[in-house]
């Protein structure tokens, strides 16, 4: 999906999980939600959350990458009125080695989310997360992915997601994803999703995706729009 003119290893958007590859030393990307939207329903009450997530990734050299995240704009639409504010910041470190000639690649991502956001959009305690992404190149145009994550804060939560990504053209890819969520405040939930990622230029990716709840504790639906840009050789 990435043109040969750059050494862009790919983006962490879209979908759950992340790219099991790190940026070269000094290279960085900006990945921006435009925004992402989710809807929840509790009885007759419906709420929608609009979030413009921002992720900055910086290659540190070797197998390491630094990540800085934030949600500078949020809007929660409720029957009683709208809430607006900034989400909390996060700091992460990714570890991934080049896949070489192997069909398998993997990476680890650890992050800490602070409590500096607006009261309506932050947790009461810092959250610590460790994620594992494993990909297998099943063919010239198909990649299979497994994502596992465990988060610790006031309560524990975990995520398991399986994905199937197909290159429709050299610049356009499509993916399907199934996920099981175990939030700390409720029982398990399942959702299914699909999306597209288009390399508009060798450095600019545009993405769109949609998730729908299948069962249990998950957002009724989620819609994702984003743009990512690579700064590097």
Image (cartoon, rainbow, N blue to C red):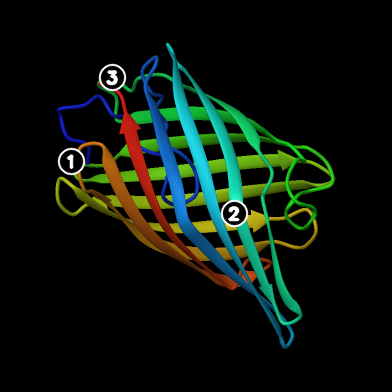
Number of marks present in the image shown: 3
1 vs 2, front mark: 2
> Does residue 12 appear in this view?
no
- At 47% from the left edge and 43% from the top edge, which residue is drawn? 146
The residues bearing labels 2 and 3 have C-alpha atoms spaced at a distance of 39 Å
Sequence order check: which comes first, mark 2 or mark 3? Answer: 2
**Eyeballing the image, is 207 above or below 24?**
below
Q: Which residue is mark 1?
A: 140
- At 69% from the left edge and 67% from the top edge, which residue is drawn? 217
Point out residue 199 in the picture as x, y percentages from the top left corner.
23, 46
Drawn side of residue 167 relative to residue 220, left or right: left
Image marks 1 and 3: residues in contact by CB distance under 8 Å: no
Image marks 2 and 3: residues in contact by CB distance under 8 Å: no
The residues bearing labels 1 and 2 have C-alpha atoms spaced at a distance of 39 Å
Point out residue 179 in the picture as x, y percentages from the top left corner.
54, 57
The residues bearing labels 1 and 3 have C-alpha atoms spaced at a distance of 15 Å
> Does residue 179 appear in this view?
yes
Sequence order check: which comes first, mark 1 or mark 3? Answer: 3
Label 3 SS: loop
Drawn side of residue 171 relative to residue 145, left or right: left
Point out residue 34 in the picture as x, y percentages from the top left corner.
44, 57
Residue sticking out furthest to the top: 62
Q: Quadrant of the N terminus?
A: top left
Instruction: Specify few, some or many for label 1: CA neighbours under 10 Å numbering under 14, 14-19, or 20 or more.
Output: few
Disc number for residue 100: 3
Drawn side of residue 38 relative to residue 84, left or right: left
Point out residue 145 in the picture as x, y percentages from the top left corner.
41, 44
Drawn side of residue 173 relative to residue 148, left or right: left
Q: Which residue is mark 2?
A: 73
Q: Quadrant of the C terminus?
A: top left
Between 130 and 30, the residue placed more toward the observer is 30
Residue 130: quarter of image: top right
């Amino acid at each position: 999906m990435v043109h040969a003119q750059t050494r862009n290893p790919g983006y962490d958007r879209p979908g759950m999980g992340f790219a099991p590859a790190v940026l070269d030393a000094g290279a960085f990307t900006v990945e921006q939600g435009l925004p992402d939207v989710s809807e929840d329903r509790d009885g007759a009450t419906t709420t929608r959350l609009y979030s413009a997530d921002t992720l900055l990734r910086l290659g540190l050299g070797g197998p390491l990458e630094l990540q800085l995240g934030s949600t500078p704009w949020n809007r929660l639409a409720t029957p009683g009125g709208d809430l607006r504010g900034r989400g909390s910041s996060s700091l992460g470190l990714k570890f991934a080695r080049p896949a070489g000639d192997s069909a398998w690649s993997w990476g680890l991502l650890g992050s800490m989310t602070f409590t500096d956001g607006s009261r309506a959009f932050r947790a009461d305690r810092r959250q610590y997360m460790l994620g594992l992404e494993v990909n297998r190149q099943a063919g010239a145009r198909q990649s299979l992915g497994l994502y596992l994550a465990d988060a610790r804060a006031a309560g524990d939560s975990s995520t398991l997601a399986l994905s199937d990504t197909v290159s429709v053209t050299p610049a356009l890819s499509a993916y399907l994803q199934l996920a099981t969520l175990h939030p700390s405040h409720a029982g398990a939930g399942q959702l299914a999703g699909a999306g597209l990622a288009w390399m508009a230029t060798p450095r600019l990716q545009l993405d769109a995706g949609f998730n729908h709840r299948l069962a249990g504790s998950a957002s009724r639906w989620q819609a994702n729009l984003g743009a990512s840009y690579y700064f590097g050789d």
